[in-house]
Image (tube, rainbow, N blue to C red):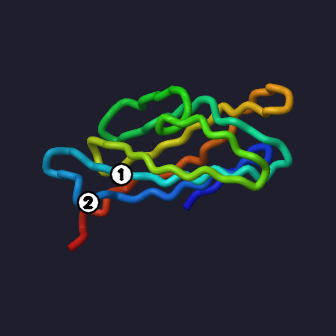
């Protein structure tokens, strides 16, 4: 698990290679990642947007941007957390992702960029 904290917002990520949904001989590798966003600050924040950089050893880097996460724009009161699971397909069994969330402080509308820590996606193709 990788963790980063930006202005009291902690982002933790755990990645899993999904061998049962992957086809290495067809250059198709599936990974899921669980994200836990925890508000350890004294302010309420709403997650508005996400930005991801995806690096695949077999392709050029990709930039993905959009509203919210998995169709949601959660608001986190102090002490609250939001957990979601998403996925990424790679053409190689080796890649990484990193990014940021744009969050709005509810008391004054100030926007902050919360760092999403870089995590690696490495296929375990030597499983039984």
Q: CA distance from mark 2 to mark 1?
A: 8 Å
Where is the C terminus found, in terms of image quarters? bottom left
Disc 2 element:
helix
43, 14: nearer the viewer: 43
Establish if 49 lies above or below 123.
above
Of all residues, the one furthest to the bottom in this rendering is 128
Give the class, few, some or many, for how many residues have Cα within 10 Å of label 2's Cα (few <14, many ≥20).
Answer: some
| Residue 100 or residue 127, whichever sits in front | 100
Estimate the x, y position of residue 19 in percent, counting from the top left: 26, 60
User: Which residue shows up at 75% across the image and 46% down it?
Assistant: 77
In this image, 31 relative to 40: left or right? left
69 to the left or right of 6: left
Query: Which residue, given by chain and number where applicable, does mark 1 sit on?
Result: 31
Q: Which residue is mark 2?
A: 19
Question: Is 43 situated above or below 109?
Answer: below
Q: Is residue 36 left or right of residue 90?
A: right
């Amino acid at each position: 698990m990788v963790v980063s904290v930006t202005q009291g917002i902690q982002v933790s990520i755990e990645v899993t290679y999904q061998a049962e949904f992957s086809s290495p001989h067809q250059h198709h590798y599936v990974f899921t990642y669980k994200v836990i966003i925890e508000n350890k600050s004294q302010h309420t924040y709403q997650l508005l947007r996400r930005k991801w950089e995806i690096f695949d050893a077999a392709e050029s880097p990709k930039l993905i941007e959009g509203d919210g996460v998995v169709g949601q724009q959660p608001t986190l009161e102090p002490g609250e957390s939001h957990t979601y699971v998403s996925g990424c397909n790679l053409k190689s069994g080796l890649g990484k992702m990193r990014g940021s969330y744009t969050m709005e402080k509810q008391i004054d509308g100030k926007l902050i960029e919360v760092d999403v820590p870089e995590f690696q996606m490495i296929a375990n193709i030597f499983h039984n």
